[in-house]
Amino acid sequence: MAGGSAPGASLVDRTVAVLAAFDERHQRLRLADLATRSGLTPPTALRILRRLVATGALDRDTAGYYTVGRLIWDIGLLAPVQTGLREVAAPFLQDLQAATRATVHLAERDGDAVLYLDRLSGVTSVPVVSRVGSRLPMHATGVGKVLLAHSPADVQQRVLAGLSRHTPYTVVAPGTIARQLDRVIKDGYATTQEEMTLGACSVAVPVRDSSREVVAALGVVVPSLRHARQRLFAALSVATAGITRELSHS
């Protein structure tokens, strides 16, 4: 259970318990699941859900599943770290997209998943499942592998213990992923070959702050990496150097 509502809890407490029922493994929930995970009775949960949907904090689809709404994401973007990073990175993402004509991603680690902070669509049509605010598995995405390589040991252990397959090319062998993470640290970049979506390959690099700590990852998605890997890596390196420089001045 993600959270619980103690007897006598206020309306605010109960509302927070409903919102806390969502996490990276529970992004779509029915009423019964939300009631269980929040510790509320179904009638109480339903009253809160109706109000949250009416305000845009949650969305409800025709199948009866609730998901986090745009209002929550917009509020989340006001968090100082995300706001500062996105604002600083924005012009460099635009330059990178113009130079590579590829889909560009800025992402950070959120628990054991990748949270996409920004995305600019490329000129070439490439099947991409990410969207701003979405969370995807770290082991199957370029930005995810970068972030995983620079994550604490306990995060790496959890992720490697639960690898899921998304395409026939997704790497799900823990030993292979571990070796890839070592290469990310050594080479300074990560790649994927149709591991999250068929027809989509990626290159990604770490984004560091002024103290050289990895705070995010920057990546591009293209149809193929053949003959383009080093060119894309060079463009990414220029962009991340600029972001790091600006972060040190902010």
Image (cartoon, grey):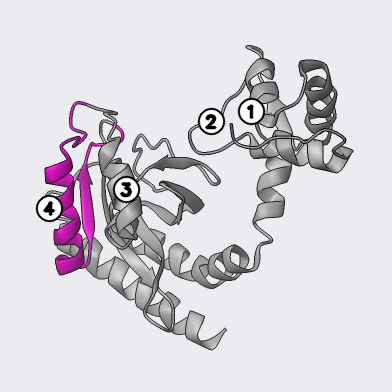
Residue 189 is a magenta residue? yes
Closer to the chain start, of discs 2 and 3, is 2
The three-letter amino acid code for the residue at tag 4 is Arg
Residue 26 has which mark?
2
Pointers 2 and 1 in contact (C-beta within 8 Å): yes
Q: How far apart in space, not on screen, are marks 4 and 3 (Cα)?
A: 22 Å
Q: Is residue 2 left or right of residue 213?
A: right
Q: Is residue 54 visible?
A: yes
Nearest the viewer among 236 and 36 is 36
- Residue 5 screen position, x and y as percent: 75, 35
Residue at position x 31%, y 63% in the image: 150
Residue 72 is a magenta residue? no
Image quadrant occupied by the N terminus? top right
Closer to the chain start, of discs 4 and 3, is 4
Q: Nearer the viewer, mark 2 or mark 3?
A: 2
Closer to the chain start, of discs 2 and 1, is 2
Q: Residues within 10 Å of mark 3 (few under 14, many from 20)?
A: many
Q: Nearer the viewer, mark 4 or mark 3?
A: 4
Residue 51 has which mark?
none
The three-letter amino acid code for the residue at tag 3 is Val
Under circle 1, the secondary element is helix
Q: How far apart in space, not on screen, are marks 2 and 3 (Cα)?
A: 26 Å
- The residue that label 4 is drawn on is 179
Q: Residues within 10 Å of mark 1 (few under 14, many from 20)?
A: many
Q: Which residues are magenta?
A: 168-197
- The residue that label 1 is drawn on is 37
Under circle 3, the secondary element is strand
Pointers 2 and 3 in contact (C-beta within 8 Å): no
The three-letter amino acid code for the residue at tag 1 is Arg
Pointers 4 and 3 in contact (C-beta within 8 Å): no
Under circle 2, the secondary element is loop
